[in-house]
Image (cartoon, rainbow, N blue to C red):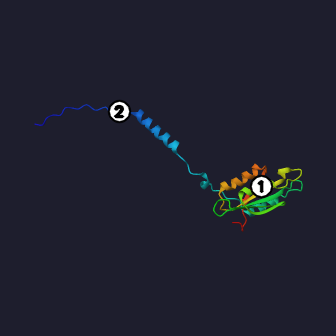
Amino acid sequence: MPKKRKAESAVDVTLPITPMLDMSFQLLSFFILTFHPMPQEGQLAINLPKPEAANVNQAEQLPDDDNKKDEYIIQVHSSSGDIELLSLQGPAAKREAMKFNDMQDELKRIPLPSEKGQNGISITIEASDKLNYSRLIDVMNLCKYLGYENVGISRMKRGGS
């Protein structure tokens, strides 16, 4: 005759929640503190306006002689994403193939219109399609640092690299 088993009482299992919460918060804080995101430059999808679009808008808004500004163009040449060469063209300046460090001296040499000062000068930065956005911002910051408030950007016309 088989032996009868004694009825075993149910085992009460408790899970220690506090240590598990402590460990999960430690892991969360570790990952937050050690996270280093990638540079944002590669994630920006920015297209400069086409030169044809600028011509349409200029025809509609012809300035009168009192509001006419001296217009200068800075061309930024790039084939690798970094600034390779700069050129400055305008009524009182024409300089080709200079480096970024020389651009500050050239912009300082621009003669200011008599009554309007730097507000009488308009600067357009024509950038190559392959130029990194941060390099374009560097050129814009240089113009703003020197006090030129009327700074615009456009895509470089064909023939620029």
Specify the quadrant that holds the N terminus.
Answer: top left
- State which quarter of the image contains the C terminus: bottom right
Please name the amino acid that badge 1 sits on: Asp
Foreground residue, 5 or 106?
106
Which mark's residue is nearer the viewer, 1 or 2? Answer: 1
Q: Residue furthest left?
A: 1
At x 75% / y 52%, what residue is drawn? 143
User: Residue pushed farthest bottom?
Assistant: 159
Q: Distance between the residues labelled 1 and 2?
A: 76 Å
Q: Is mark 1 on a helix, strand or loop?
A: helix
Q: Which mark is residue 38?
A: none
Q: Where is residue 93 in the image (x, y as percent from the top left)?
A: 82, 60
Disc 1 or 2, which lies upstream in sequence?
A: 2
List x then y, in percent, for residue 83: 68, 59
Callout 2, which amino acid?
A: Thr
Residue of label 2: 14
SS label for mark 2: loop
Within 10 Å of the Cα at label 1, are there few (<14), some (14-19), or many (20+) other Cα atoms? few
Nearer to us in this view, 83 or 11: 83
Which residue is depicted at the point 69% across and 53% down?
Answer: 138
**Mark 2, other Cα within 10 Å: few <14 / some 14–19 / many ≥20:** few
Spot occupied by residue 113 in the image (x, y as percentages of width and height): 87, 53
Depth check: give the residue in front, 20 or 38: 38
Provide residue 33's location: percent of width, then percent of height.
Answer: 52, 42
| Rendered view: 161 above or below 118 | below
| Left or right position of 108 against 28 | right
- Residue underneath mark 1: 105
